[in-house]
Image (spheres, helix red, strand yellow):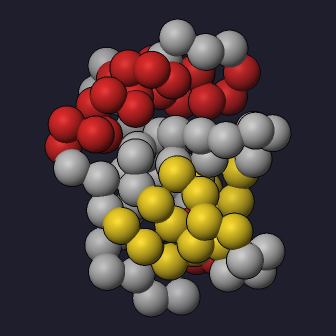
């Protein structure tokens, strides 16, 4: 799938083309995967998503900060990405 900007970033709104849902991303793209901020914690291949609305830098940092406080995969990714690790 083509996107206007890759890799995706935390706070981006993306459309998962196979299930027809729009997701807000909890974290930056990790390899070829993205993770949603909603429930249940869901991971998808980035290639299955198209960008609907790009997050601003401030929105990205706020989302990473919020998700870094969580348990699970989202929290792990967000803490690592907040520290500048890939």
Reply above or below: 29 against 22. Answer: above
Residue at 71%, 50% (x, y): give it: 43
Q: Residue furthest bottom?
A: 2
Residue at 30%, 73% (x, y): give it: 5
Reply above or below: 37 against 22. Answer: above
Reply above or below: 34 against 17. Answer: above
Residue at 19%, 37% (x, y): give it: 58
Which image quarter is the N terminus in?
bottom right
Instruction: Please state if 58 lies on the left or on the right of 62 as rendered.
Output: left
Q: How far across and down, in percent of the image, does residue 84 sit?
A: 28, 27
Q: How far across and down, in percent of the image, does residue 6 sit?
A: 35, 68
Residue at 67%, 81% (x, y): give it: 17
For the image, the number of numbered tags is: 0
Res 15 seen here: yes
Q: How far across and down, in percent of the image, does residue 29 sit?
A: 47, 52
Give the quarter of the image for residue 73: top right
Reply above or below: 5 against 30. Answer: below
Instruction: Please state if 36 lies on the left or on the right of 30 as rendered.
Output: right
Give the quarter of the image for residue 66: top left
Q: How far across and down, in percent of the image, does residue 13 sit?
A: 46, 60
Which image quarter is the C terminus in?
top left
Res 80 seen here: no
Q: Residue furthest left?
A: 57
Give the quarter of the image for residue 3: bottom left
Front residue of 9/63: it is 63
């Amino acid at each position: 799938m083509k996107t206007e900007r890759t890799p995706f970033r935390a706070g981006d709104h993306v459309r998962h083309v196979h299930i027809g849902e729009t997701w807000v991303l909890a974290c930056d793209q990790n390899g070829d995967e993205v993770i949603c901020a909603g429930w249940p914690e869901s991971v998808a291949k980035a290639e299955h998503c198209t960008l609907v609305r790009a997050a601003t830098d401030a929105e990205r940092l706020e989302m990473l900060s919020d998700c870094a406080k969580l348990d699970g995969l989202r929290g792990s990714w967000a803490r690592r990405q907040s520290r500048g690790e890939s």
